[in-house]
Image (cartoon, rainbow, N blue to C red):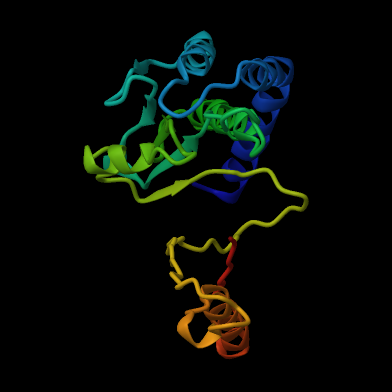
Amino acid sequence: MSDCNMDGAKQVACDAIEKARDDLFTVSQNIWSHPEEKFQEHHAHVVLTTFLEKFGFNVEKNFHLPTAFRAVLGDGNIGPHVAVLCEYDALPEIGHACGHNLIAEVGVAAALGVKAAFEYIGKPVGKFTVLGTPAEEGGGGKIDLINAGVFNGVDVSMMAHPATHNEPAVGFLALKTVTVKFLGKAAHASAFPWEGENALDAAVLSYQSVSCLRQQMKPTWRVHGET
């Protein structure tokens, strides 16, 4: 594709998204106003798939999971296969504290832009998938879809996450939780203290040791503790 066509395709994509601005805002606010926990995102599933169908997409609903979906454009045999992911589950009691309604909005907006760009160019130059991935908040919906082979053949998958600043590439850390129990032995503190085993002292020393270890940790490592 020439630079001229690329610039034109970019502008057409932006124009298509801007034209659908009000519809996209409605999608986001609708999902925000109806928070649903992991694997229960039935309302959001309807909102997003209905939106995509309205704009001419063939949508596979309940795709491998009851609240997942997929819509595909183009042909992966003539170019890269790029997937943009939508999230739309909420936290218990809190609601949409992590902006998943915005993530979903960005995902379907990207689909509109790519569709318009393909139409402008006159043919697909690759394959584009918008994928609805439920249960990000502790449910592992993406893991289920990976295990089902949904990401086979995908060259790049991406999503946008709301934050307080713009950043194209963000580092994320894996998480491992370890529970440590300190068990002591009761004894009379003044009469027979030598017969006791102080669990609190052990916990305090362990916490302080981890704190001292932090100065030797790599910048990308994090250790946190709570009681």
The image shows residue 215, relative to residue 159, as above or below, that is below
**Residue situated in front as seen by the camera: 72 or 205:** 205
**Residue situated in front as seen by the camera: 120 or 212:** 212
The image shows residue 25, relative to residue 204, as above or below, that is above
Where residue 206 appears, as percent x and y from the top left, is: 53, 80
Q: Residue furthest front?
A: 191
**Residue situated in front as seen by the camera: 111 or 220:** 220
Q: Is residue 38 left or right of residue 107?
A: left
Q: Is residue 15 left or right of residue 126?
A: right
Q: Residue at x 55, y 27 (%)?
A: 108
Q: Residue furthest left?
A: 148
Where residue 82 appears, as percent x and y from the top left, is: 41, 43
Q: Residue at x 71, y 48 (%)?
A: 163
Snapshot quadrant of residue 8? top right
Where residue 45 appears, as percent x and y from the top left, is: 47, 17
Q: Residue at x 58, y 68 (%)?
A: 224
Q: Residue furthest right?
A: 164
**Which quarter of the rendering shows the C terminus?**
bottom right
Where residue 100 appears, as percent x and y from the top left, is: 59, 33
Snapshot quadrant of residue 81? top left
Question: What count of labels does the image hold?
Answer: 0
